[in-house]
Amino acid sequence: MPEFSRRAALMQLGAAGLAAMTPGAAISQNPFASFDAKPWAFLTPDEARFLAALSDVLIPQDAFPSASQAGVVDFIDLQLAGPYGKGADLYLQGPFGEATPEQGYQAPYPPATLIREGIARFEASGTRLADLDASGREDVARRLSEGEGVDLGDVPAQTLFDEIWSLVKEGYFADPIYGGNKDYAGWRMVGFPGAHAYYTDFIGRNAPYRAPPRGIAHVPGRSRSASPARGRPAAPIHPATEEG
Amino acid sequence: MVTELPKTDVVIVGAGWTGLAAAKELADAGQRCVVIERGDWRHDATSFGAPEEHDELKYARRKGHMIDTPIKTLSFRNTSDQTARPIRRLGSFLPGKGLGGAGIHWNGQLWRPLESDLSMRSHYTERYGAAVLEGTNVQDWGVSYDELEPHLDFFDRVCGTAGVAGNLNGEIREGGNPFEGPRSADYPNPPMTPSPPLQRFRDTARAMGYHPFQMPSANVTRAYENPYGAQLHPCTYCGFCERFGCGYFAKADPIICIYDVVKDHENFELRMNSHVLRVETSADGKTATGVRYIDARGREVFQPADTVCLNAYALWNVHLMLVSGLGTPYDPKTGQGTVGRNYAYQTMAAVSVFFDEEVWSNPFMGAGALGMTIDDFNGDNFDHTGLGFVGGGYISANQTNGRPINYQPTPPGTPSWGAEWKRAVRENYLHHVSLACHGSSVAVPQNHLDLDPTYVDDFGQPLLRMTFDFPENDRKMSAYVLSKAEEIARNMDNVRAVGTSNNAAEGQGYSVVPYQTTHNTGGAVIGTDPATSVVNRYGQMWDHHNVFVFGACLFPQNLGYNPTGPLMGLAYWTLEHMKTDYLANPRPLMDA
């Protein structure tokens, strides 16, 4: 059983169906409630809920897990607690001032602070992202991504969005040793076989490569089932093991 | 308190490709060489082994092998009227750190310049008239293809390069690049195996009358021993090449190809974790006396030397000259001065080709230099009459680095996140290839490097400041080459969607955020006129005859090719003249 909360996942499933029928309906009374009990390395449970809600808009559940179901919030928590979050690879000397988008990251603090302050500014308005329904969450994601229609004070909304979206993709597709990509969700979804890679005899062949994914820590995963033909349902979340 | 060490014959700044090649050649010539390297010691055998090295997050995203910006970065602006801001996080280009430098995380795409590239100003002037170069600082290299050829060939042998010679001593050969200059010998190893998308690109390009060939590759294709006696092994097509070191000993790099065969030489000494602050000069300013650096224990040290070789990354060589007061800094307002002049980059565009389910690209299989290329639109291989630009680029179907965090191909019109994005990634990941348009970059008066007035590095020295935007010439060139690539894509079978992207699209400023290439060139260029070059045609500084400069900082403008081949050809050319001419009788090798 993956570590993501079965309850939260079920709520999500139900909510998605509900939202489809009745736009605007509340997603649940207490989404991602199990986050209160988790031993987070950096995040507060409320921050974790914000990130879960946002990341599940970016990578929602379909036949493959959503971002939070695949452990993306756990991944982000560990990343923000570590050297990346602390800005170990960022030049953070001042002065800070007006800059163009072409000049890249110019926030006067590292990613962990950016995300903490960004969430705090957003929720200070009295709205908690996790409490919004599906269309409400999507609307916030769109406004953050465009950097418009959302007031985060001096926190640059687009920078915040880009940083989170980057982390979400990393959490979904990075090696599972980092806490995300649980049960190789992301790798199975696309058909990436992982870190153990010898293709000398296959490189010229026009054929699917069906080895099950295997990460750095050698734990073999289940293989992707046959590539879903267009127009038919995609592979199930837990397709039957084909090999190994 | 500065510790002064005993004098050495040669001090070499940087232990990458050019620094280690210099150490090997000069140590063999009896010169006592001290190599000073900022980063850590490492070795392919102990540092790059799979599966641990196959960690996309650690190396491709967190850039584990790249320079740490808190220690070394530069500031950037598009134009001189803007305030430059520091590149706080690496993006557009990725200088390396540690033994082997950026040479351990390259792709291994190993090219040589066209004959006409090296005499770009005279060639275009003669064929089209001088007006086509107006507004540019395009100039001749001062060294000819024939002079460089033996050295380009030697480096092919150092790397065990895989490919087919398209021009063997003047004879044009099937399967190679018919536009290249004559080679004195074929590649030491046979070409790589093309994947299904590359086979399709080849067949379509050929049917359209173009001349496809397998990209020359320093990912070697069979067991190989290089001229120094180093052993390389065949590539496994593992797909972890660019941004990674190769634990298979299959991608030629400075550690396995050169360091291993010089490390025990009695004339070789390597000092790691040592950061050179400046090159010191004599009282009359005519020569360098050695280098001052902070050693691994934090002490400030002066290493005197008869000869100083600058072998740092292209940008850092220019920085070191500027903070040391070597040469005259370039002033874009007056056009005077040369250090920092003619900074250029690489103009990259791409076509995204989405196949139907009949074609399996399996993009996780690949190699850094696994490509099928046409050179029909590179350099002056095509008629530029009436086009309004000079230069060009190769078009290459590349299957290089299809790892899932960075490689998420979606057809045009797909939202950038959400359910549709997710479905598109899932449906296209195994059925996609990119055609790279690897374009040249002309030097123009406004693009340059100097010292930042505000920001400093960890050692209190001013940051290098880059002022750069894509010149109009290159925007036109890139749009043209991209249109040709798109035509090929649309003619390929089993293609259900085609997308394009162009870093140099009209109206779009150069940005340091998205990765483009680590091909920063110029700033300390080679030439025959001290008014427009920092070093003479032998790589020797005009102003300080015992300082020799190596690397892509020498390029007067950038080629439509990857720089490692050309810059190593120049390195061996310089080293030959040092060994056979200069060291026995130190003096300026050309009259200013």
Image (spheres, rainbow, N blue to C red):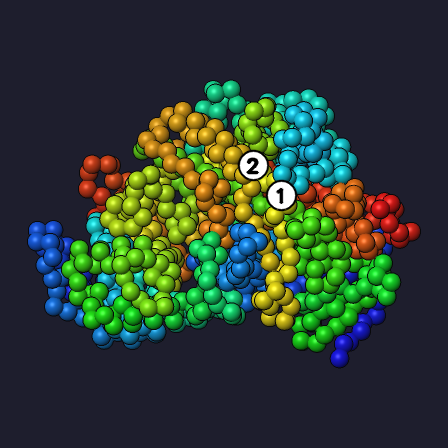
Mark 2 secondary-structure assignment:
helix
The amino acid type found where label 2 is placed reads Asn
| Residue depicted at x 29% and y 50% | B417
Image spot of residue B132 (x, y percent): 63, 31
Q: Is residue B153 visible?
A: no
- The reply to whether discs 1 and 2 touch (Cβ–Cβ < 8 Å) is yes
Q: Amino acid at mark 1?
A: Val
Left or right relative to B569: residue B544: right
Which quadrant is home to the N terminus of chain B? Answer: bottom right
N-terminal of the pair, mark 1 or mark 2, is 1
The image shows residue A113, relative to residue B48, as above or below, that is: below
Q: Which residue position is annotated with label 2? A: B473
> Could you tell me residue A150's position as x and y percent?
27, 62
**Observer-nearest of A59 and B165:** A59
Q: Is residue B61 above or below residue B186?
A: below
- The residue indicated by pointer 1 is B444
Within 10 Å of the Cα at label 1, are there few (<14), some (14-19), or many (20+) other Cα atoms? many
Classify mark 1: helix, strand or loop. Answer: loop
Q: Nearer the viewer, residue B249 or B430?
A: B430
